[in-house]
Amino acid sequence: KHPSGVASMSFRTDSSALQLQVAPLAVGRKDGTVSIWDLSPPSEDNPMGRTLLFEMKKLHPGGVSCLKYQPQEPVLLSTGKCSNSILMHLFDAPDHSGRLWKSRKGHTSPPQCIRYLHPATNGLASYHDGTDAAACQILSGGSKDRTLRIFSSARSVLDKEYSQGQGLLKKSKKFKLDSVAELLLPPVTAMSSSQARSRNWGDLVTIHQNHSFCYVWSTKRGAQSGPILRQEHWNVSTMKAPPPKSTHATSVAMSSCGNYAIVGTRDGTIYRYNVQSGMARGQYPFKEPEEKGPKKLVRAGDIDRTMKSLEKKFKISNRKSDQDREELDVIVEFAKE
């Protein structure tokens, strides 16, 4: 009995299942989990009949919509109610487990920031001016799922999600999180790209909701690549005090040369960063560096201070003259001898 309720079922009919003496049944739950059951009765050759073979927990957040085994193939198609995805799992392992073979995914909620990857001067991409499928790619972000995706209006094979790090699924299971989205960056609010130095370093910069840092991405690798753009005194660790809210980024632009990123903040300050090194290269309006150590109050026209400084000078000069006289007397006596 499934406590969360059954949403969809599908039987597997390929010959490989008959050779392994199993009768798999895929069951999709309302909590998004997909379970594979063996319906064959127990026997001498198969004492483990009518048992759970494999389970994929929370495969579709929000619940499973439909399951369907391909006829005469060990391939299972699954769709979700809220995940906005279709997944294809292949069952070719001896232990009857399945692995993700192909997938098509989109945002689980409406995106708030979209733009062409490298827009032309007129802002349009067309085959008439010699552009190819790479020029028809659209960056999409700002959704509540915290993902940054790229879609192609010419070839759906180029659709993918940009990676924000390796092993996020394992980390979410290790820390017992509800979903991987809790480990991702906040939703994207603005982005800017430059194709000039895309072969050398990252060519895409993004800013995020209620966030002071900026992140560099590589559209060639389809992943976060490069340093975090921030001021030197801003803390990166979540265990320390975060930067003030007045430094939250509100706008971003990359230079045409691809070397610099210009970031505007809530308090009106504009920061400039080097995209390759991540180091700060100035700000507007210009802020002079603060002097370290306590400042002493100096009063103009203080007669006591003037007299003390003069006394010190006289004492030093007197000591020096006395020392010179003693050395001169020693030299004269030595010459007489």
Image: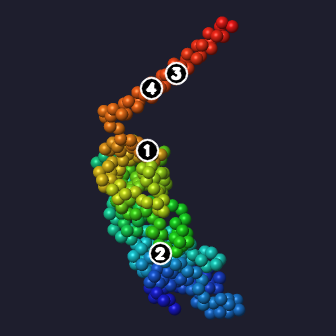
In the displayed structure, 5 sits above or below 258; it is below
Closest to the observer: 278 or 128?
Answer: 278
Closest to the observer: 101 or 323?
Answer: 323
Which residue has dot 1 on it? 293
Which residue has dot 4 on it? 313
| Chain-order first, disc 2 or disc 3 | 2
Report x, y in % for residue 209.
36, 61
User: Cα distance, mark 1 to mark 3?
Assistant: 34 Å
Mark nearest the camera among 4 and 2 is 4
Q: Which mark is residue 108?
A: none
Q: Amino acid at mark 3?
A: Lys
Report x, y in % for residue 162.
45, 60
Report x, y in % for residue 17.
61, 82
Query: In the rendered image, which quarter is residue 37 located in?
Result: bottom right
Find out whether the residues at labels 1 and 2 contact each other: C-beta distance under 8 Å: no
Q: Which mark is residue 320?
A: 3
Q: Quadrant of the C terminus?
A: top right
Find out whether the residues at labels 4 and 2 contact each other: C-beta distance under 8 Å: no
SS of the residue at dot 4? helix
Q: Amino acid at mark 1?
A: Gly
Query: In the rendered image, which quarter is residue 7 located in?
Result: bottom left
Mark nearest the camera among 1 and 2 is 1
User: Cα distance, mark 1 to mark 2?
Assistant: 48 Å
Picture residue at 56% right of the left edge, 20% below the top: 323
User: Cα distance, mark 1 to mark 4?
Assistant: 27 Å
Picture residue at 63% right of the left edge, 90% below the top: 49
Q: Which mark is residue 178?
A: 2
SS of the residue at dot 3? helix
User: Cα distance, mark 4 to mark 2?
Assistant: 75 Å
